[in-house]
Amino acid sequence: MTQHPITETATPLIEWSDRAFALGLTSMDTTHREFVALVNALARAEDADFGQCLSRLHQHTRAHFAREDALMDQTRFPAAAEHKAEHRRVLAELAQLQRRVDKGVISFARSYVRERLPEWFHLHLATMDSALAAHLRDYPQAAASA
Ligand SMILES: [Fe+2]
Ligand SMILES: [Fe+2]
């Protein structure tokens, strides 16, 4: 019988907590929970599954950012330019990782996931996404339809 003690017992790379991460907007919070689950799955993935897990995270992140970008446009969010630029920067990084992983180079992507993504997520939520969530409280219809 094969055992996977590390997979089963390791603490997730990012541990979701409402106190740390919930912004109080259901649509954004649901997306962020999914993001955390995908990052954790990627961190635990075996080499053989790494590319597929990264691709899933990349696709999800594209949709996640596209929704936030659309909400910023619909509600004329004042800090939209900086927030969208940050989304583009991260998507470019993920695309670069994906290209390396597709060529069989996984180590760089693994360290990016472990060392950069959790910190980036904390910071992005605490600054740009929480500012957007606060702004969206004045636009409940737009926020609910996201
Ligand atoms: Fe977000
Ligand atoms: Fe964002």
Image (tube, rainbow, N blue to C red):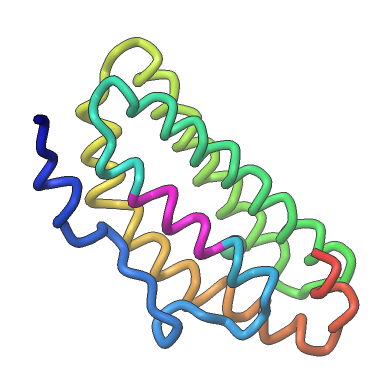
Where in the image, quadrant-wise, is ligand 2 located? bottom right
The percent coordinates of residue 76 (x first, y second) are: 86, 71
When the figure is inspected, residue 9 is found, relative to residue 135, above or below; the finding is above
**Residue in the picture at 25% in, 59% down:** 12
Image quarter in which the C terminus is found: bottom right
The percent coordinates of residue 53 (x first, y second) are: 42, 34
When the figure is inspected, residue 106 is found, relative to residue 26, above or below; the finding is above
**Residue in the picture at 32% in, 59% down:** 118
The percent coordinates of residue 80 (x first, y second) are: 72, 65
The percent coordinates of residue 137 (x first, y second) are: 76, 88
The answer to which quarter of the image holds residue 136 is: bottom right
Q: Which residues are magenta?
A: 32-40
**Residue in the picture at 68% in, 46% down:** 63
The overriding secondary structure of the stretch rendered in magenta is helix
Residues 127 and 137: in front is 137
Residues 26 and 98: in front is 26
